[in-house]
Image (tube, rainbow, N blue to C red):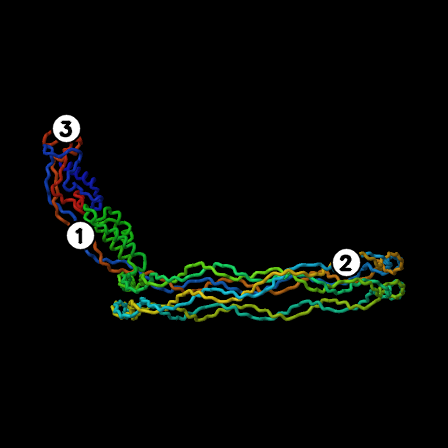
C-alpha cells in the first residue's frame, strides 16, 4: 500500500514537471517541488495532524552535465579541376548536284499584213466677196470763239512811313565785380600707412613615406597545344556541255507604198486702197502781247529808328562767406582673431576578414541559437526548449536534444566548423576624422567719422535800378519812281503747213501655195530573227568534304602567390613659425595753404553812343497791274471721219478630209512553250558526333580534425526525500488514514499539503527524473 501511494505521487510529480525520455526538464521547472514552496496535491494544507506524511532522506546517484573537449573528424568539401570528354553534335553542309527540268515561254516573231484606212487633209482653194468699212477723212473750216485776258496798268497813290535814324551820346553807370585774393592756412589729418613684421605660428601636415610587405595572388597565363579535328569543304571543278538557243537577227527588204504632199505655187493679182499723205500751205492769223515799260511814282513806308532812356530793374548776386563744420570717413585696419573649425583625417589601414561564401552566416545563426545558455535558472544555462536546436543539428549530424542541454552547444560548434568558408584578409583604410578649433587672424577695415571745417561762399540777391537806352521805330511815308511793264495786243499773220491724205487704188501680186497628193514606192529594210541551237562548255563546281587535324593553342591560367613592397604615405603634424607682414596706418596732422578769392563791387561811369530813330510819313505812286477779259473769233480747220462701205474679192483655202487605204506590214510575237534541263547544286545537312574535351570542378570529400566541446553526463550523489505512509491520505481516493483508523471518503478540498524539504537539491539543472534512473 505504501509503495503504491509513493509511486503514484512520484508519477504525478513527474507528469507535472514534464520529464521525458531525454532526461531533462522541458519547461525548466523542478520535478518534485519548487524551491522553498509547498506542493498542493488535491487542495488543503499539510498540518501536524495524524494524517501528516513522514519524510525521510536517502542517498541516490544522479547524472549531471559537464563540458569535455573532444577531437572530431568533420567532412570538408574541396573542388578539383578534371578534364572530361563528351560527344557534341556538329552540323555540316554536304553538296550534291541535281538535274531539273524547266518550262519557259519564248515569243516567236511572225510578220502579218493588214489593210489600214486613214484620213488626209486636202487643201481646196475658193473665192469669196467681202465687204469692209473704210474711214475717209473730211476737213472743214469752223468759226471758234475764245476769251483772252488782256492786261492793263493803273497808278495808285500810296502813303508810307520811314524810320530815320540819328545818334546821341548818353552817360551810363555800370557795376564791376573786382576780385580780391586772400591766402588762408588749413589743418587736416592724413592716415599714413606703415608695415610691421608679426610672427605667426601655423600647423603643417608633413607627408612621411613608409613601405610594407604585401602578399597578392596573380593569375599567370600559360598556353597548351590541343589537337583538334575539323571538317573542310574542298571545291572540285568539272566541265559540262550545255545546249542553248539563240535568236539570230537577219534583214529583209520590203517594198512600201506611201503618199507625199507636193506643193504647187500660183501667182495672183490683188487691188487695194492706200491713203496717200500730202501737205498744203494755209495762212493763219494770231495775237501777240507786246510789253511796254513806263515810269510810275510810288509811295512807300519806312520804319525810322530812334532811342529812348528807360528805367530798368536788375538783380545782383552779392557773395557771402560762411565757415561750416563737416565729418569725413577715415578707414583703419584692425586685426581680429577668430576660431576656425578644421577637420583632419588621422585614420589608418586595418586588416579585416572577409568571408568568401554564405555558409558562415548559418554557423553564426547556430551560435546565436546556442548563445542563450544561462538564461533559464531551472536548466542551468540551456535554451528554454530543446526544439530550438533542430535547424542546425539537422545539417551537422547531431541528435536534436540528445545528451542534455550541452549537446546543443556541441551541435552548434560542429555546424560552424563544417560550414565555415575560406576567409581572406584585406587592408581597408579606416578614416578617423578629428575636428579642431584653430585661431585665424584677419584684418577688418573699420571706419570712423572725423570732423573738419571748410568755407562756403553763398550769394544773396539784391535788386538795383539803372537807365537803359531802348531803340524804337516810327513810320515815315516816302515816294520813288518805279518801272512798270504793260502789255499791248497785236494781230499778226503766218503761214502754217497742214498735213492731209487722199485715197489711191493700187495693184499687187501675191503667191498662193497649194498641195497635191502623189503616191510613191520605196524599199524598206525589215529586221527579223530566227532561232539557232548552239552548245557551250560550262564549268561546274562541287564541294568535297575532307577531315583534317590541327593543333590549337589553348590559353589557361594558374594562380601564383607573390610578395611586393607597397609604399604608403602617412601625415605627420608639425608646428612651424613664419613672419607675416601686417599693413597698419597712423594718423598725422598736416598744414596747407590755399587761396580764397572774393569779389568787391565797384560802380563806374562811361559814355555810350545811342542810335535813335524818328518816323517820317512820305507819299509814292505805285503802278498796279490788272487784266480784263475780251471775247474774240477765229477760223479753225476741223477734220472729221466719214465711214464708207466697199467690196473686194478674197481668195481663201479650206481643208477637206478624205479617206484613203493602204497595206501595212506588222510583226506579232506568238508565245511558244519549251523545256530545258539545268543542273542545281543542293546542300544536305548532315549531323555528326564529335568528341569534345572540357574542364569540370569535381567536389572531393575530405575529413578534417576539429576541437569540439561536448556536454557529457557525470554521476553525482545527492539526498533524495522519501515520503511516509501518511502522504497517501491526501491523494488516494477512498482510502482511510492509517493513524486514525478511519475509512472515511477523502475529498480534494480537505486534502493535506505536502511540504518540500528545506533544501531540495534533487531536481537541479540537467538532472534526470527520480523514477527513470537517468
Q: Nearer the viewer, residue 582 or 729?
A: 582
The residue at which mark 2 appears reads as 149
- Along the polypeptide, which appears first: circle 2 or circle 1? 1
The answer to the question of whether label 2 and label 1 lie on touching residues, with beta carbons closer than 8 A, is no
Q: Nearer the viewer, residue 56 or 429?
A: 429
- Along the polypeptide, which appears first: circle 3 or circle 2? 2
Q: CA distance from mark 1 to mark 3?
A: 51 Å
The residue at which mark 1 appears reads as 66
Q: Position of residue 204 (x, y in %)?
A: 27, 68
Residue 299 picture quarter: bottom right
* SS for callout 2: strand
**Drawn side of residue 530 relative to residue 660, left or right:** left
Number of numbered discs on residues: 3
* SS for callout 1: strand
The residue at which mark 3 appears reads as 744
Q: Residues within 10 Å of mark 3 (few under 14, many from 20)?
A: few
* SS for callout 3: loop
Residue 447 visible somewhere in the drawing: no
Q: Nearer the viewer, residue 711 or 176?
A: 176
- Along the polypeptide, which appears first: circle 1 or circle 3? 1
Q: Nearer the viewer, mark 3 or mark 2?
A: 2
Indicate whether 20 appears above or below 575. Answer: above
**Drawn side of residue 293 relative to residue 603, left or right:** right
Q: CA distance from mark 2 to mark 1?
A: 162 Å
Amino acid at each position: 500500500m505504501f509503495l503504491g501511494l509513493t509511486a503514484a505521487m512520484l508519477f504525478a510529480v513527474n507528469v507535472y514537471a514534464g520529464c521525458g525520455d531525454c532526461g531533462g526538464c522541458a519547461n525548466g521547472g523542478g520535478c518534485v517541488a519548487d524551491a522553498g514552496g509547498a506542493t498542493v496535491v488535491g487542495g488543503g494544507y499539510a498540518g501536524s495532524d495524524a494524517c501528516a506524511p513522514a519524510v525521510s532522506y536517502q542517498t541516490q546517484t544522479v547524472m549531471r552535465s559537464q563540458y569535455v573537449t573532444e577531437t572530431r573528424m568533420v567532412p570538408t568539401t574541396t573542388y578539383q579541376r578534371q578534364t572530361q570528354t563528351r560527344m557534341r553534335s556538329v552540323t555540316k553542309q554536304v553538296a550534291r548536284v541535281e538535274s531539273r527540268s524547266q518550262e519557259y515561254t519564248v515569243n516567236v516573231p511572225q510578220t502579218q499584213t493588214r489593210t489600214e484606212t486613214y484620213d488626209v487633209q486636202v487643201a481646196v482653194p475658193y473665192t469669196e466677196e467681202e465687204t469692209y468699212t473704210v474711214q475717209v477723212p473730211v476737213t472743214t473750216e469752223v468759226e471758234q470763239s475764245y476769251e483772252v485776258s488782256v492786261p492793263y496798268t493803273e497808278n495808285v497813290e500810296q502813303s508810307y512811313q520811314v524810320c530815320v535814324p540819328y545818334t546821341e551820346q548818353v552817360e551810363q553807370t555800370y557795376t564791376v565785380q573786382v576780385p580780391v585774393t586772400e591766402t588762408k592756412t588749413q589743418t587736416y589729418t592724413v592716415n599714413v600707412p606703415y608695415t610691421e613684421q608679426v610672427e605667426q605660428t601655423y600647423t603643417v601636415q608633413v607627408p612621411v613615406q613608409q613601405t610594407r610587405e604585401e602578399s597578392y595572388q596573380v593569375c599567370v597565363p600559360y598556353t597548351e597545344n590541343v589537337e583538334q579535328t575539323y571538317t573542310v569543304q574542298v571545291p572540285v571543278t568539272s566541265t559540262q556541255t550545255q545546249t542553248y538557243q539563240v535568236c539570230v537577227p537577219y534583214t529583209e527588204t520590203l517594198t512600201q507604198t506611201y503618199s507625199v504632199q507636193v506643193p504647187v505655187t500660183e501667182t495672183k493679182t490683188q487691188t487695194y486702197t492706200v491713203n496717200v499723205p500730202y501737205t498744203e500751205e494755209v495762212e493763219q492769223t494770231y495775237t501777240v502781247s507786246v510789253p511796254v515799260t513806263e515810269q510810275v511814282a510810288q509811295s512807300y513806308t519806312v520804319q525810322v529808328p530812334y532811342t529812348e532812356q528807360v528805367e530798368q530793374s536788375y538783380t545782383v548776386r552779392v557773395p557771402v562767406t560762411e565757415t561750416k563744420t563737416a565729418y569725413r570717413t577715415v578707414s583703419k585696419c584692425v586685426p581680429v582673431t577668430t576660431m576656425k573649425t578644421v577637420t583632419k583625417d588621422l585614420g589608418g589601414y586595418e586588416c579585416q576578414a572577409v568571408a568568401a561564401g554564405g555558409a558562415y552566416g548559418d554557423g553564426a545563426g547556430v551560435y546565436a541559437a546556442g548563445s542563450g545558455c544561462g538564461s533559464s535558472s531551472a536548466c542551468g544555462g540551456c535554451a528554454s526548449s530543446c526544439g530550438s536546436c533542430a535547424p542546425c543539428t539537422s545539417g551537422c549530424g547531431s541528435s536534436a536534444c540528445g545528451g542534455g542541454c550541452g549537446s546543443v552547444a556541441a551541435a552548434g560548434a560542429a555546424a560552424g566548423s563544417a560550414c565555415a568558408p575560406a576567409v581572406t584578409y584585406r587592408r581597408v583604410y579606416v578614416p578617423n576624422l578629428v575636428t579642431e578649433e584653430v585661431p585665424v587672424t584677419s584684418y577688418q577695415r573699420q571706419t570712423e567719422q572725423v570732423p573738419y571745417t571748410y568755407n562756403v561762399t553763398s550769394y544773396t540777391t539784391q535788386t538795383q535800378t539803372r537807365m537803359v537806352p531802348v531803340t524804337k521805330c516810327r513810320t515815315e511815308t516816302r515816294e520813288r519812281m518805279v518801272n512798270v511793264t504793260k502789255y499791248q495786243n497785236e494781230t499778226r499773220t503766218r503761214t502754217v503747213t497742214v498735213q492731209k491724205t487722199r485715197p489711191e487704188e493700187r495693184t499687187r501680186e501675191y503667191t498662193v501655195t497649194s498641195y497635191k497628193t502623189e503616191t510613191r514606192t520605196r524599199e524598206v529594210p525589215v529586221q527579223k530573227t530566227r532561232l539557232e541551237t548552239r552548245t557551250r562548255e560550262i564549268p561546274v563546281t562541287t564541294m568535297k568534304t575532307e577531315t583534317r587535324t590541327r593543333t590549337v593553342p589553348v590559353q589557361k591560367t594558374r594562380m601564383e602567390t607573390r610578395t611586393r613592397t607597397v609604399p604608403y604615405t602617412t601625415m605627420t603634424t608639425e608646428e612651424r613659425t613664419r613672419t607675416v607682414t601686417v599693413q597698419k596706418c597712423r594718423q598725422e596732422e598736416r598744414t596747407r595753404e590755399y587761396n580764397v578769392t572774393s569779389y568787391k563791387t565797384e560802380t563806374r561811369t562811361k559814355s555810350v553812343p545811342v542810335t535813335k530813330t524818328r518816323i517820317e510819313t512820305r507819299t509814292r505812286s505805285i503802278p498796279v497791274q490788272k487784266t480784263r477779259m475780251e471775247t474774240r473769233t477765229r477760223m479753225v480747220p476741223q477734220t472729221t471721219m466719214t465711214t464708207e462701205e466697199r467690196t473686194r474679192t478674197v481668195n481663201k483655202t479650206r481643208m477637206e478630209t478624205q479617206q484613203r487605204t493602204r497595206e501595212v506590214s506588222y510583226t506579232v510575237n506568238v508565245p511558244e512553250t519549251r523545256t530545258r534541263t539545268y543542273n542545281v547544286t543542293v546542300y544536305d545537312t548532315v549531323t555528326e558526333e564529335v568528341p569534345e574535351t572540357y574542364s569540370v570542378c569535381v567536389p572531393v570529400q575530405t575529413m578534417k580534425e576539429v576541437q569540439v566541446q561536448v556536454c557529457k553526463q557525470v554521476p553525482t550523489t545527492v539526498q533524495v526525500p522519501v515520503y511516509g505512509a501518511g502522504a497517501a491520505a491526501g491523494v488516494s481516493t477512498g482510502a482511510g488514514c492509517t493513524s486514525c483508523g478511519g475509512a472515511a471518503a477523502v475529498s480534494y478540498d480537505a486534502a493535506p499539503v505536502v511540504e518540500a524539504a528545506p533544501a531540495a537539491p534533487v531536481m537541479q539543472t540537467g538532472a534526470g527524473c527520480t523514477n527513470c534512473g537517468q
